Amino acid sequence: MSSLDFILTAKEVAQDLRCSKSQVYRLLRGEVSGLKVLPHLAIGRKKVVPRSALESWKRESISGMIRADSEKNTVDAMH
C-alpha cells in the first residue's frame, strides 16, 4: 500500500461496486458465496478498504475470465 493509497469507507465501496452497504459488510465478513473476503482494515468497529486492495480484489473476483495458464492446466488435467 503506497502513501498515496486512498482509504474507502463501506459507503464508498458500495458506490464503487453499485451495491448496498449491507452487501459490502457481507463481503468484508466473507459471507458471499463464491467470493473471497474483501481485504480491509478494522479500526475499532469501523472497517475501511484501501483503494488498491479493492481494485486487486475486483480483478481477482471477475468470473468467466480465462487465466493465462488455463490451457496448460487443462492439458495437464487430461494426462
Image (cartoon, grey):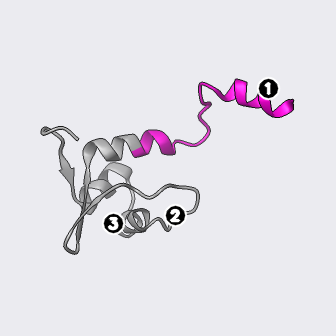
Residue 61 is one of the magenta-drawn residues: yes
Q: Circle 1 sits in a helix, a strand or a loop, which is it?
A: helix
Q: CA distance from mark 3 to mark 1?
A: 42 Å
Q: Earlier in the sequence, mark 3 or mark 2?
A: 3
- Label total for image: 3
The image's mark for residue 32 is 2
Query: What residue sits 38% from the left and 40% below the top?
Result: 56
Residue 14 lies, in percent from the top left, at: 33, 57
Q: Identity of the amino acid at label 1?
A: Val
Point out the stretch of residues depicted in magenta: 57-79
Q: Amino acid at mark 3?
A: Lys
| Depth order, front residue of 76/49 | 76
Q: Which mark is residue 21?
A: 3
Q: Secondary structure at mark 2?
A: loop
Identify the residue position indicated by label 1 in the image: 75
On screen, residue 60 versus residue 15, left or right, reads right
Rendering coords of residue 12 (x, y %): 25, 55
Q: Residue at horizontal 45%, vertical 38%?
A: 59
State how far apart marks 3 and 2 are (Cα). Answer: 13 Å
Residue 40 inside the magenta-drawn segment: no
- Asked if the residue at tag 2 contacts the one at tag 3, i.e. Cβ–Cβ closer than 8 Å, the answer is no
